[in-house]
Image (cartoon, rainbow, N blue to C red):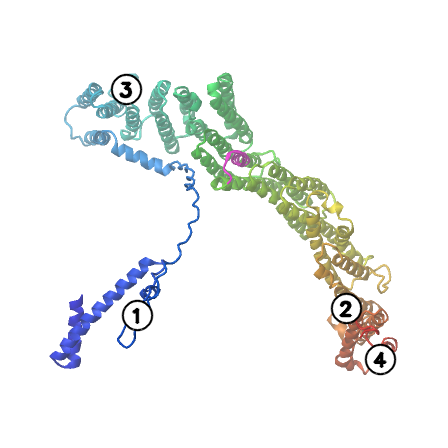
């Protein structure tokens, strides 16, 4: 690097210096520059490594700390050296006994996920045992099958077909024999060879019978039974799960590989029945779950594919027996799996077969019956009876307790499903919801996460199935609430509620369990609203629909609140508790809808719904007392809903207008409930907070704030109202609107005087009271001008001379009154307020009333103000003194 910089410097120096001397100087400068850059980089790297460590003391400070002996010169004799006094040694403090820090608690490693398990299984298959033989036998099996089929179709093999098949069969038998001989020396090789060879034998028999009709059905069936039985015997004798799996794969793959698409389904399902009987025989001796699941998946997978492609209603009689047979086979396999487990108390129940078998069979049965509800309901009842029978048969076996409970749950599920099946075709949704709840229960019983989350997923699948059933069914149900769609929705709600209950009692308090717990609870509530809401939309209209919605929202709050009180986990209890105020808020929305449809909520069916809602809401608020924030919002919305109810009832009752009654009375009825509740919360709050007496003070403050805000809004709205008091004549102050405004002023003043209000706000009471009185007096004056003077109410009212004169007189009277009372009673602030009002009136005279001097009203305004000011000058010419300005002061 130095040479490179030197060369660059030499070139630059040669150009600049124009000679050899410049090049030499440039070379030297380049080398020095490179060296300096390298040192700078090394220094930066050292500082970076030091980080925040304190730098060592400078050398100069170290030298200053050492004693210095001056040098003696000839003309300056050396002074006596100072004695070196060592610094005092610090006194060592006693050192406490060393205590090692506590060892951290050992963390429990999380179990492997499903993906990790699959990856581990694949890795073990390719890394353990005799991998070449396993792979080779599978590939050889597929190659032989393909070659035989191709060669036969192309006519390439000139050897007679029976001879060819016999040769293949003899080679396969030789393979089985050789594998049996090598079972002890080379176990992995021998097992793989035996399994593949038996698979070839099974395929050979199937080809000889199915494709070329070289043998009849009975000999083919006997040979298949022998081969499958031999496969099971070999696997059991050698305790070889891999052998059983390889042979089973070959057996199930044989008809698929050799199929021409024109065969009989009876032969196919008979063949699969033989294979599954072999699985059942093996399960009698060995608890090999992989073998059971493989047989189940292969059988029902192929059966479903054949049903989609080939089935027609005319084949029901020849297909139904096989479905029943396989249902019974895989009903017995889980029982044998538990029975043959080494420790039956710790045996893991095969949830895939226990719940997958009835689900798959019920769906296939529905397809075979062309989704006819009643025959499918009968099938569900028969299955329920069967489950009840086997659960009853093992009721005294303690080692079968888990199986007995599971069978009992399935019996209840099938019996429940039979009801909607008899009325509609939405069976899939009900089955998925109930089976999902069963899987969640089973997952917690066995401490296995996979069944739990599968059950949660089934709740979503159930909702999708129900939605599709409703979407494709355009016909409305004949009976409300007693139909398949509604009962299907109820079963979805039941499944989600049971799942939430299981997560609440057995799940963790945080993480995904908490999310599932809350999500399932909200899911159940949502589908309850969807199911009942659909029934309301179909079977109710007008006032009956409004009544049904009011009852649904109000009555639902009670059981939800009770569930929240009994929830063990805080998040679920709080979630259910906060649902109660949300339902009350929905009740207000429904009332607004009733108002828009001109439906009276206090008559007929809506009145009954309101009464039921009131009772249920009362108990709902009492149930959520442990959740203060929820009960606070619920109480506030509870009374807000009653206010909305009163407002809607009044608006509907007088919406069209009553000719003999003025709008002032309707307005009074409209706002009276709010004012009465405000008065009650201020003077007698106990009835308003009695459903939840525990946080009474907090409730009174929150509800009082809401009601006071509503009262202020009512007061502001009434200031601009000129409603008639017909049939009574209009009398200033003594009319409904003015009396309501005075009530608002009294309530506001009383609220500001309450002990719950901070002292800083209570100080402003006089100012707020003065502003309220001034606003009410102004509104009453304009209202009197409108009713008594005949001036139209609207923006042109302020342009009237009569209105301006009246305002001048009233404002002046108020100012004079405040002026005089403040002077006589020594209230300086009141006197100043009166002075401000009089100044405002003067400004009004100069800016507004001056334009009306051409008429009597304008003149009267000026004269009235002058007389009143004169009167004030006579009665209270000066402001009252401050409390410190006494005659004896100083």
Q: How many angstroms separate mark 1 from mark 3 (CA)? A: 102 Å
Mark found first going from the N terminus, 1 or 3? 1
**Residue 424 location (% of width, % of height):** 54, 33
Question: How busy is the neighbourhood of tag 2: few (under 14 within 10 Å), some, or many (20 plus)?
Answer: some
Q: Between marks 3 and 2, how big is the CA–CA gap? A: 105 Å
Which of the two discs, 4 and 2, labels the residue nearer the N terminus?
2
Total marks drawn? 4
Mark 4 vs mark 2, foreground winner is: 4
| Sequence-first disc among 4 and 3 | 3
In screen coordinates, is 446 left or right of 836? left
Q: Residues within 10 Å of mark 4 (few under 14, many from 20)?
A: some
- Specify the segment rendered in magenta: 495-509
* Secondary structure category for the residue under label 2: loop
Query: How many residues crowd around disc 3 within 10 Å: few (fewer than 14), some, or many (20 or more)?
Result: some
Q: Quadrant of the C terminus?
A: bottom right
Which of the two discs, 1 and 4, labels the residue nearer the N terminus? 1
Is residue 340 found left or right of 474 in the rendered image? left
Neighbourhood count class around disc 1 (C-alpha, 10 Å): few under 14, some 14–19, many 20 upward: few
In primary-sequence order, the first of circles 3 and 2 is: 3
Q: Could you say which is closer to the camera, residue 41 or residue 666?
A: 41
Figure check: 434 above or below 230: below
- Read off the residue under disc 4: 866
Kindly identify which numbered label has been placed on residue 70: 1
Q: Residue under circle 2?
A: 793
Residue 731 appears anywhere in the view: yes
Q: Nearer the viewer, mark 3 or mark 2?
A: 3
Question: In the rendered image, which residue does mark 3 sit on?
Answer: 238
Give the mark nearer the N terminus: 1 vs 2: 1
């Amino acid at each position: 690097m130095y040479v490179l910089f030197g060369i660059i410097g030499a070139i630059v120096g040669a150009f600049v210096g124009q000679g050899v001397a410049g090049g030499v100087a440039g070379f030297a400068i380049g080398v020095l520059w490179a060296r300096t850059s390298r040192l700078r980089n090394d220094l930066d790297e050292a500082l970076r490594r030091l980080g925040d460590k304190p730098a060592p003391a400078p050398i100069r400070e170290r030298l200053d700390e050492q004693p210095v002996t001056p040098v003696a010169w000839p003309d300056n004799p050396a002074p006596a050296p100072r004695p070196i006094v060592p610094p005092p040694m610090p006194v060592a403090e006693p050192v406490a006994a060393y205590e090692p820090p506590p060892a951290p608690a050992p963390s429990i490693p999380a179990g492997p996920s499903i993906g990790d398990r699959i990856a581990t299984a694949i890795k073990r298959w390719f890394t353990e045992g005799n991998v070449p033989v396993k792979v080779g036998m599978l590939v050889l099996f597929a190659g032989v099958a393909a070659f035989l089929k191709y060669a036969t179709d192309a006519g390439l093999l000139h050897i007679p077909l029976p001879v060819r098949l016999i040769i293949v069969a003899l080679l396969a038998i030789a393979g089985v024999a050789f594998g049996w001989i090598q079972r002890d020396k080379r176990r992995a090789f021998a097992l793989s060879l035996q399994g593949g060879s038996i698979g070839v034998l099974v395929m050979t028999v199937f080809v000889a019978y199915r494709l070329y009709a070289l043998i009849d059905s009975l000999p083919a069936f006997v040979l298949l039974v022998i081969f499958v039985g031999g496969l099971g015997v070999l696997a059991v004798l050698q305790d070889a799960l891999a052998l059983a799996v390889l042979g089973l794969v070959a057996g199930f793959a044989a008809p698929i590989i050799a199929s021409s698409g024109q065969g009989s389904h009876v032969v196919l399902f008979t063949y699969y029945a033989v294979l599954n009987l072999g699985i059942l025989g093996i399960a009698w001796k060995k608890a090999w779950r992989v073998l059971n699941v493989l047989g189940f998946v292969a059988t029902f997978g192929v059966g479903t594919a054949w049903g989609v492609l080939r089935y027609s209603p005319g084949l029901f009689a020849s297909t139904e027996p096989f479905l029943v047979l396989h249902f019974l086979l895989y009903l017995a396999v889980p029982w044998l799996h538990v029975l043959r487990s080494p420790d039956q108390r710790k045996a893991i129940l095969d949830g895939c077969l226990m719940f997958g078998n009835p689900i798959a069979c019920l769906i296939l049965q529905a397809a075979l019956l062309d989704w006819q509800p009643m025959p499918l309901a009968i099938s569900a009842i028969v299955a329920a009876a069967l489950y009840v029978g086997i659960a009853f048969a093992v009721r005294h076996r303690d080692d079968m307790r888990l199986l007995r409970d599971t069978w009992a749950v399935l019996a209840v599920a099938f019996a429940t499903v039979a009801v909607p099946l008899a009325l509609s075709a939405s069976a899939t949704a009900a089955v998925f919801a109930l089976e999902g709840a069963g899987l969640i229960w089973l997952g917690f019983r066995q401490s296995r996460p996979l069944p739990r989350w599968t059950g949660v997923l089934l709740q979503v699948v159930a909702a999708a199935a129900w939605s599709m059933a409703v979407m494709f069914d355009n016909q409305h149900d004949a009976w409300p609430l007693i139909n398949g769609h509604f009962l299907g929705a109820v079963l979805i709600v039941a499944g989600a509620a049971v799942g939430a209950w299981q997560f609440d009692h057995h799940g963790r308090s945080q993480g995904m369990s908490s999310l599932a717990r809350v999500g399932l609870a909200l899911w159940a509530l949502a589908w309850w609203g969807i199911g009942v809401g659909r029934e309301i939309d179909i079977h109710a209209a007008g006032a009956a629909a409004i009544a049904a919605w009011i009852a649904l929202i109000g009555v639902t709050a009670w059981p939800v609140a009770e569930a929240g009180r009994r929830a063990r986990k805080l998040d679920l209890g709080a979630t259910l508790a906060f649902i109660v105020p949300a339902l009350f808020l929905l009740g207000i929305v429904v009332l607004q809808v009733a108002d828009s449809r001109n439906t009276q909520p206090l008559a007929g069916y809506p009145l009954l719904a309101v009464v039921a809602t009131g009772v249920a809401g009362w108990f709902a608020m009492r149930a959520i007392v442990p959740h203060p924030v929820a009960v606070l919002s619920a109480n506030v919305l509870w009374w807000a809903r009653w206010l909305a109810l009163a407002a809607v009832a009044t608006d509907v009752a007088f919406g069209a207008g009553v000719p003999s009654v003025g709008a002032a009375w309707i307005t009074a009825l409209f706002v009276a409930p709010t004012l009465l509740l405000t008065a009650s919360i201020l003077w007698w709050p106990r009835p308003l907070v009695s459903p939840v007496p525990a946080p009474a003070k907090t409730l009174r403050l929150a509800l009082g704030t809401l009601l006071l805000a509503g009262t202020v809004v009512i007061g502001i709205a009434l200031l601009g109202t000129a409603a008639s008091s017909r049939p009574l004549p209009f009398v200033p102050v003594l009319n409904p609107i003015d009396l309501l405004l005075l009530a608002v002023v009294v309530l506001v003043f009383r609220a500001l005087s309450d002990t719950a209000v901070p002292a800083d706000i209570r100080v402003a009471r006089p100012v707020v009271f003065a502003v309220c009185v001034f606003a009410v007096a102004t509104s009453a004056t304009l209202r009197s001008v409108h009713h008594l003077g005949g001036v139209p109410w609207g923006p042109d009212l302020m342009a009237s001379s009569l209105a301006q004169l009246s305002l001048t007189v009233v404002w002046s009277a108020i100012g004079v009154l405040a002026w005089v009372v403040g002077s006589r009673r020594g209230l300086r602030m009141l006197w100043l307020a009166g002075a401000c009002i009089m100044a405002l009136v003067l400004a009004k005279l100069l800016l507004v009333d001056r334009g009306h001097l051409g008429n009597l009203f304008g003149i009267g305004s000026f004269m009235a103000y002058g007389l009143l000011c004169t009167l004030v000058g006579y009665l209270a010419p000066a402001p009252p003194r401050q409390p410190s300005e006494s005659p004896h002061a100083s």
